[in-house]
Amino acid sequence: MAAVVTEGADYPAHREADVVLRDGRTCHIRPLRPEDADLLVEFHSRLSPETIYFRFFAPYPTLSARDVERFTHVDHVDRVALAATMAGEIVGVGRYDRIDTNSAEVAFSIRDDQQGRGLGSILLEHLAVAARENGVSHFVGEVLPNNARMIATFLEAGYQAERETVDGVVHFVLDIEPTESSLAVMAAREHRAEARSVARLLAPSSVAVIGASRKPGTIGHELVRHILAAGFVGPVYAIHPEAEQIAGVPAFPSVLDAPGSIDLAVVAVPAAAVEAVVGDCAAAGVRGLIVISGGFAETGPEGRDRQRRLVATAREHGMRVVGPNCLGIINTDPSVRLNASLSPTTPKRGRTAFFSQSGALGTAILDNIGRRGLGLSTFVSAGNRADISANDLLQYWEEDEATDLVLLYLESIGNPRKFTRIARRMSMNKPVIAVKSGRSTRWNPLGHAVRESALPTAAIEAIFSQSGVIQTDTLNELFDVASVLSTQPLPTGRRVAVIGNSDALAVLALDACATWGLDVAGAPLTLGVDATPEALGRGLAAIVEDPAADAILVVHVPPLQSDATAYERVIAATAARSAKPVLAILIASSETSLLQGDPEAVGPASEGVPVFTSVEDAVYALSLISHYAAWRSRSRGEFPELDRIDPEAARAVIADHLGGDAGPVLLDQGESTRLLACYGIDVWPWVDVGSAREAVAAAKRVGYPVALKTRARALAHRIDLGGVRLDLGSTTAVRAAYDSMVGTLGSEAAQSLVVQKMAEPGVAVVVGSREDPLFGPVVTFGLAGVIPELLGDRGYRIPPLTDADARELIRAPGASPMLTGHRGSEPVNLAALEELLLRVGQLADEHPEIGELVLDPVIATRHGLAILDASVTLTNPDVRTDPGARRLLN
């Protein structure tokens, strides 16, 4: 197919993206434009003869005017070119030219000084997304045999690849449809790159404070003091226009005047001056920024523009940004010892990492951690979260050998699909505890640019649970759970043994266990109010050895005129030898804290024992941990290969009805059925009828008994409102039902009557999906009917679904026992329901144009399913927050 260049073709701005390279630095990807002519010539002039030969198979020292015209004038459809830019220069170009309807030739050039940083693989990913968008399914490439890097780029992308060598040239054909392998490759590369970009911030070799002040008590002065007080191991520079030194640190007018290289710049200047400072940092080769300054997106439109410019400039020059409007970062690693924050104290060394989006709460959070006796490996306050986010930190902490537990205080999530993907992988080895503010109010801080989700709170909580994230409603609950997980082993079950010297506290513990779904292992062991420390130790040791208990609650009121510390020592010493978690409720304690363990002990709980002042708080924390332990021990399942899946046919149906700027399009029943059939979802047949005579004829044709119902949306499935008549077993019954419905229903409802064969009696359920602006596709399941709908008794999962996800989704609604033989009823075919959910999940995941899909009702029986009605609404979706190529989102 001849390529056609369309002058003035619409510029595809959605293809612009900031990306993280293999070494943790950033660059910008964007479509090539006609005005890039000079930049392209400069780019080509800096390519080595070998690189040029690999690209053009011949010496090509300069580009002619005709070459430049052809390379920069593309139509963004049949001819697509993407440029990778850094510091205003082009450092890489990838392009494809369509050969025929489904194929395009692809080629790359990477500037020699930027090779080996993963630019080729990133450009290939982004070109593949553009190609699929334009109907191209295969890339064709020709590579010289000694071009090892390009050959590796094609072979290691994870796509299905064919290659052969002809006349000394390696010919590749890549099927660029995403595969499990290609997605895994992309995720692994993204993980390594983003982890490295965070490591560059958390472990700098040198730090500069820009906006340092000679006046004690000011932000600029205190930042310098905090860095020095923590004992940072590298050089520290104060940046001040006039001072020679600040707090004993040498001062310089600009980062450009500092005598050594600067890894990390801490910026504390007025917001209006930040842009110029970032420009100086870029020129000085600074590797990362912490912007303490406020006055950005949290202040309104002008501040949002200032924030966008800050991030764009930083990323264009390879820098990542913490903030703005943040508290800063802390790293307690003895080889770093960094407190680049507004917190006057550095927490003790620990194996817990903390991410907070709130700068205002940061100091209080660190104070709470200290009071509870907890330690931290690293702490990051992201403020407006303009660049570095929880997703970036999770990528780093997953590999960080100094971190075993991650705490998150989230005010917004910019890319929840990516968050759940990372968290699900990470939670298998390291617990993630999160408190999300604004879950009920749906309020996001002014500084955070986040799409609005239309999902109910229950759906968001279910999605987090699907990923293994331990959710708490308050910071105190988060610290309660953290105090247990940072010191105790995970329970292997939900059986809890209770020991103590108070019958009243023991009863409270039993009630709390019943409330939170924990099982009590036998009767509480109450020792009496005068029990000695030795008696408590013997009783506790016996429970430690008892296989009937998975966790232990010690409830204790110190006797009058007794040494409370003697009891605490016994609890701590015994717990240090326990392979099951031990939690202490000591009523005499002033606040939740930590009993320090024996420093010479080596058992699983040698770090100490968490102490609670409330029975209910302790049991609730243990219930969350037990639920997490059960999630972690469950099989993750597999992605089954389903038959009768035809994505191309589905795309054709969608394309027939969805134009470029069309709003939501509700498909009629026939087109909905046609689309669903592309994924093996068969809707029960029906017949439209316009008279009693047609209704009788249709009933005879499909076979008695039949149902007569209206397809008017307001009355569909509403037996209680006369919208459905069931079990019509004769001509007389059909005629009477038809006349009655025409006479009682409104004109719209009466004009949309259909006859459908009665399905076998069973349990009516609803299966659906919704494309959410923030979370992307979400699959829903519940029992049919008005009452379950009003109660919100639904299960939710994000696709792609494993078979285990489908099983759990079926069992998520409270009414799910109706499917498994409740009160003597016949169990339904759960395997058929699971398969239906898998098919709906795959359809929704692969076609974001499906704004809403509802199968209601689906009659489930022991023999299978009958899908009696289907509704599909198509929309032009936003680009999903977890797209098919690596990119950073603000």
Image: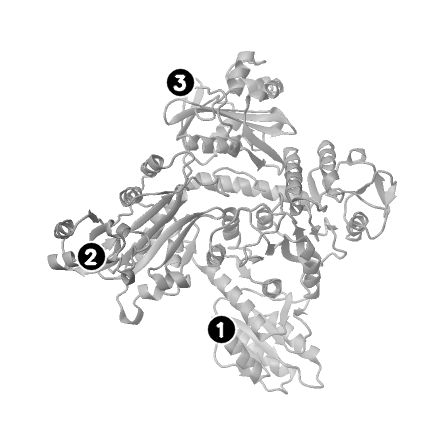
Residue 205 location (% of width, % of height): 73, 42
Q: How is the image coloured?
A: one colour
Report the residue at 67% width, 59% height from top: 365
As helix, strand or loop, the secondary structure at mark 2 comes to loop
As helix, strand or loop, the secondary structure at mark 3 comes to loop
Query: Up-down: is 875 above or below 563?
Result: above
Disc 3: which residue: 2
Query: Up-down: is 60 above or below 765?
Result: above
Image depth: mark 3 or mark 2 in front: 2
Mark sitting earlier along the chain (2/1):
1
Q: Amino acid at mark 1?
A: Thr
- Total marks placed: 3
Classify 10 Å Cα crowding around label 1: few (below 14), some (14-19), many (20 and above): few
Q: How far apart are the two marked residues, 3 and 2, measured between alpha carbons?
A: 56 Å
State which quadrant residue 848 falls in. Answer: top left
**Nearest the camera: 388 or 169?**
388
Query: Up-down: is 483 above or below 86?
Result: below
Q: Amino acid at mark 3?
A: Ala
Q: How far apart are the two marked residues, 2 and 1, measured between alpha carbons?
A: 43 Å
Disc 1: which residue: 515
As helix, strand or loop, the secondary structure at mark 1 comes to helix
Is disc 1 in contact with disc 3, using a CB cutoff of under 8 Å? no
Disc 2: which residue: 758
- Is residue 759 visible to us here? no
Is disc 2 in contact with disc 1, using a CB cutoff of under 8 Å? no
Q: Amino acid at mark 2?
A: Met
